[in-house]
Image: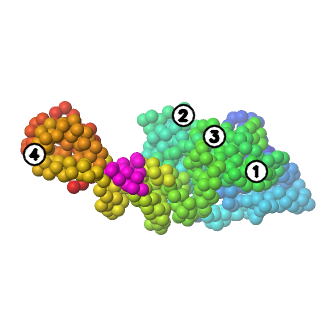
Amino acid sequence: MIIATAGHIDHGKTALVHALTGIDTDRLPEEKQRGMSIDLGFAYQPLDSGRVMGFVDVPGHERFIRNMLAGVTGIQSAMLIVAADDGPMPQTKEHLSILDLLGVSDGVIALTKIDRVETNRLKEVENEIKTMVAGTCLKDADIMPVSAIDGSGIEDLRDHLEAMTDLLEKRKGNGYFRLSIDRCFTIQGAGLVVTGSVFSGKVNVGDVLTLSPDGTEVRVRGIHSQNRKSETGIAGERCAINIAGANLKGSAVKRGGWLLTPQIHAPVPRFDANLKVLPNEKKPLRHWTPVHVHAGAAEIPGRIAILGQKEISPGAEGLVQVVLDRRMSILRDDHFILRDQSAQRTIAGGKVVDPFSPSRGRAKPVRIKFLEDMMYSEPDYALSRLLQHNPEGVDLKKFSVAWNLAQVDVEALLEIVEHKMAGPEKKPLIFSKVHWETLESEVISNLNAWHQANPDRSNLNAHGLRTATSKRIAMTVFQDMLDCLANSERIVNLGPGYCLPGFEPALSKNDTALWNKIDPILREGNMKAPVVSELANQLKLDQKALEKFLVKIAKLGRVRQVAKNRFFLPDAVVSLAEIAAALGKSNGERGFSAAEFRDQTNIGRNLAIEILEFFDKSGLTWRSGDTRKVLKSVSDIFGTN
């Protein structure tokens, strides 16, 4: 367990940690000289249970609040220190507000310097403290009188803190690993070391991690967990991790960065959150207010876009979008603090709802509903609600990263939530079955309407169908839907487009009569269809008029124009394509030549080359020198026989 100290300057935080652990956390020469903490200090106390209790000692001076925030963010337990002679002071109250905004779940209040005051003063200060903490995260915290000078109450406080470690609910550790970097330094012979609090997950020596937000890949060479050498580090602990990497530059690693599992490396320029404005603010928080954003150990300037209202009153909550000056690594449920533009005053704090927020449409009703669904505590229920309210689908990758769900957790989630998945494997969308079936019905209805409006045309391509669909979903997802409909024989894939089963494009009486003459000739020729001039001579027709007619019926899908002067029946094209595909499969990486294709089809060389060039243009094959390789399946390009 890690415990963060909090409290006003000179109230004895460092002295109390020394009395509890025997360690002086003031490590900087300036701290020794001035007798005050400036940066974070660390101490550890082994317990009889074998566990180690860690302390993060934070500076109390108002000028060093940014350092204090770097130490307490992400920590579940706190020890608020109040001196008996002074009582609660301005920084006591600001630190308490910060702990409250950060959602600290457990804590204790140490009433220090009791050796300096009388009993009646102790009672007076205790009452002041109770009034101050009422309604905060420390409202039920015990007040423990102590003296770091004569040792009074130290053992009782130590026992109380150890008991807290037994009662404290452990942080969930089944997400991916995240460590908020608050220190980095180089050790001769070992290399770069980063330290910080582990927010989630587990790390092992030898693991490959990512420094975020810059994206540098590193390997874990060594781990010290809770000040002890270890093979692992887990959520809720403080770790020092020795890292190495081919592209690692020590100067680029600073406080405020993250060391994390590569799967959740996704720094963002903005995020949506639920924000609470402190009650003691003198005026409401207005739209586009400039602020300093503190999250993890990072501090980044930004602005606040208020969603769904014009302002948030003191003491009230509301949805906001935090727009950052530079990218930050942050996930759903992370706490953050806002300070004013001059970084002199804490004004608000909140929890991240969605790290992947849009720059446009951020306050639309559908987006607000999305955020409300994301605020549910359990991912399965949140996802079910999102699927219900988002007919255009939910990005599964973004959802799983936002919630820090490991792959095993995602798989378990999909077992619970009824869904339909579509799109590319690396970035799938998921839909509720109801919405998916509604989209399928709309596609079929649109295709039927198109047939009625265009009775002389055989098929509509995928882009045309997608344009007619009311929901704007990605083309890859829409193509998956068309494939599902074709596989279930609710629509027919004709290669370049789609039609309904049984649909035949209408021809005029004269065109039908002419086609009835052409069709038997092409069918007899099969894979050796005659050139247009030969066909015209055979039918005793004008060659140009015949060419015009063949181009017309090619648009209807009755023939395919393989070359300028040659047309084939679709079945013949598929048969030729299947021969090319079989050659490609049997020859593997070597590919196949035009001569091999000619021999397999038993057609002439010139015709073989014309057909292969048509396959190249269609995307079935790719030519490299004198050989060709098959790129896609025949059904993807031309449909099936």
Which residue is painted at 26% across and 46% down in the image?
553
Residue at point 75% right, 36% down?
342
Residue 639, horizontal then vertical, whole percent? 27, 52
Q: Which residue was labeled with disc 2? A: 252
Label 4, secondary structure: give it.
Answer: helix
Residue type at numbered disc 3: Leu
| Label 1, label 2: how far apart the Cα atoms are | 38 Å
Q: CA distance from mark 4 to mark 2?
A: 62 Å
Which circle's residue, 3 or 2, is located before the other in the chain? 2
From this viewpoint, is residue 76 visible?
yes
Q: Is residue 209 left or right of residue 49?
A: left
Q: Nearer the viewer, residue 309 or 340?
A: 309
Residue 47 visible: no
Image coords of residue 408 (percent x, y): 44, 60
What residue sits right under mark 4 in the picture? 600
Q: Nearer the viewer, mark 3 or mark 1?
A: 1
Residue name at image x 54 percent, y 63 percent = 388
| Disc ID at residue 130 | none
